[in-house]
Image: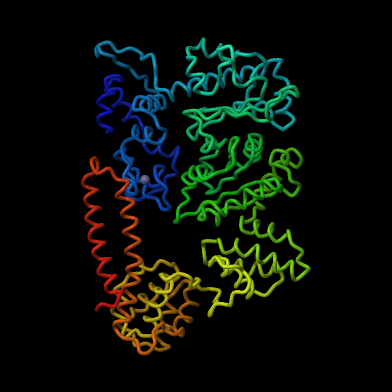
Amino acid sequence: MYAEEVAAMAGRIRDEDIALVRERTSIADVISEVVTLKSAGGGNLKGLCPFHDEKSPSFNVSPARNVFYCFGCGVGGDAIKFLMDAEHLGFVESVESLAARAGIQLRYVEDDRSTPRARPQQGQRQRLVAAHAAAVEFYRAQLTTAGARPAREFLARRGFDRAAAERYGCGFAPDGWDLLTKHLRQQGFSHDELVTGGLSRPARSGSLIDRFRRRLMWPIRDITGDVIGFGARKLFDDDDGPKYLNTPETPIYKKSHVLYGIDQAKREIAKQGKVVVVEGYTDVMACHLADVPTAVATCGTAFGSDHISVLRRVLFDSDERAGEIIFTFDGDAAGQKAALRAFEDDQRFVGRTFIAVSPDNMDPCDLRLAKGDLAVRDLVARREPLVDFALRHVINRFDLDTVDGRVEAMRRAAPLVAKIKDREKRPEYVRKLAGDLGMEIEPVQRAVLGAANGQPAAGRPAPARPGPATPAVDSPRSMVEREALKLALQEPVLAGPMFDAVEAGDYQHPVHAAVRVAVAAAGGAAGATGGAVWIERVRDACDDLAGQALVGELAVEPLRIDGEVDPRYVSVTMARLQWSSVTGRIRDLKSKIQRINPVSHKDEYFALFGELLSLEQHARALREQAAGGL
Ligand SMILES: [Zn+2]
């Protein structure tokens, strides 16, 4: 598809110029503007794919070959292709953007290849970005005029001097109906371009008028630094519009993705592995000036999942490396609600989310004014994990001096703890919650387990063995994994060979996998004779603390079979364990195959399809084995 487009378009930009753009462009530089890349060895780089949602990096870049390729979704190509996909540009726009970056003057050819001349119209995105760049200059020049005094005073009152205003490109939209519109029309921008870009709008009379008037203007940039919209603050009492007005949705401005300040903050965010989310333009400026260079803000919308995706790619937030997201909130209800809502969103994200609430309910801008730069840095440093913050706010609503208050607080707080996906962290929070409530651990633990199983917190009998360091026994998968480990520890002579044949990767729970690894490190179950010595050897070989505790527990827990253990029971158990793992792999493979274009990636498609067929065959065999048909 790409090659045809190149062929169709290449007549418009000279071929040698396209080749020059390819040659002078560093694909690593282009991609690093959007995705944080780390070394993948062999001179290659990797990061989280911007084209599909993933937890560990399968997006690879080869600077030597000037190409990228994602093993997860199969997207790949050169720098031109990357910009086309990442920024939804056409081929010509993408080449133009790279040429501008590399300082290459493109020459265009129409029908007659021998007379290159400047092409009159560029791609839409380039045009809208150019119109915004011209608007920034216009507004900036206006900021020094007499009419802009309230704008200058506003900035000064918030602690921003001229240098700060210049660094962020602040400007002033003058008092007049169509001053910007006329200015941009004179520069050759069309009626449609000004409307489409959100800079002007048609009046009732049909003529164009400026969208922003008599306001302090902040240019909003995308991650690469192009201005794509504006935020405009009201300055005059007789302005009956909202306090802040933003560019509407346009082909280049999507508020669900936009993060103010990301262009200036992205390098520090990647370097420090954390980002500070504040609420307004002045807060971003105040944070950056106070030496919290990782601050960004959403523009006229709540922080949402698209923002998370943008930040995760900059943070390189993967299973291997976790990034920290710190929200600053006024201590008000809206902020609390937003924090609690995060529980409903991306669960992986919850454990890395922190809340920084100013003690005096001041936003970072006010805080810097009142107490200086150090206080802003201190606010961020005194962040609190989201879970702690949320629990505190739930508990604080109840009178903990009464038994009823404590029980009710426990009932409300238990579902929050139960929602923590990272099960290793749950016991820690159960203890913390019990401590905060002044209750025993046991009832709190029961309430959390009840909430995790979707049952009411009260009136449920305690589970048989609520060991705090062990994963909850609440899924068939978890149960079969435990059973396999019990067989290796308690019946190594009988179960050894079959147990050793199933790898740690087939165990879903990390603690179970850790014990499986420890069995191998202790010499494998097949060679063991059992007894206390064997258990000790496995425990010593386990470097996971929770795993060590689990070894002791599984060594004595009765097997789930009435009577003697026989080879059939071992076989059924191991088959059920593998079957879960294989069906998971089949699911992943199917979704991967669906995302591949069978025409353009024929070889890969057939390779994966072959893999799927053999896995399905394997799964059928395992299911028969699991049913006991030896
Ligand atoms: Zn991908």
Residue 490, how many percent across, how many down? 39, 85
Identify whether 620 is placed above or below 331: below
The structure residue drawn at horizontal position 62% and vertical position 21%, both measured from the top left corner, is 212
Residue 303, how many percent across, how many down? 57, 43
Q: How is the image coloured?
A: rainbow
The structure residue drawn at horizontal position 57% and vertical position 64%, both measured from the top left corner, is 418
Residue 457, how many percent across, how many down? 62, 69
Figure quadrant of residue 217: top right
> Which image quarter has ligand 1?
top left
Q: Quadrant of the N terminus?
A: top left
Residue positioned most to the right: 401
Q: Residue 602 vs residue 117: left or right?
A: left
Q: How many numbered marks does the figure carry?
A: 0
Residue 611, how many percent across, how many down? 24, 57
Identify whether 35 is placed above or below 165: below
Residue closest to the eye, 46 or 434 = 434
Q: Quadrant of the C terminus?
A: bottom left
Residue closest to the eye, 407 or 359 = 407
Residue closest to the eye, 615 or 28 = 615
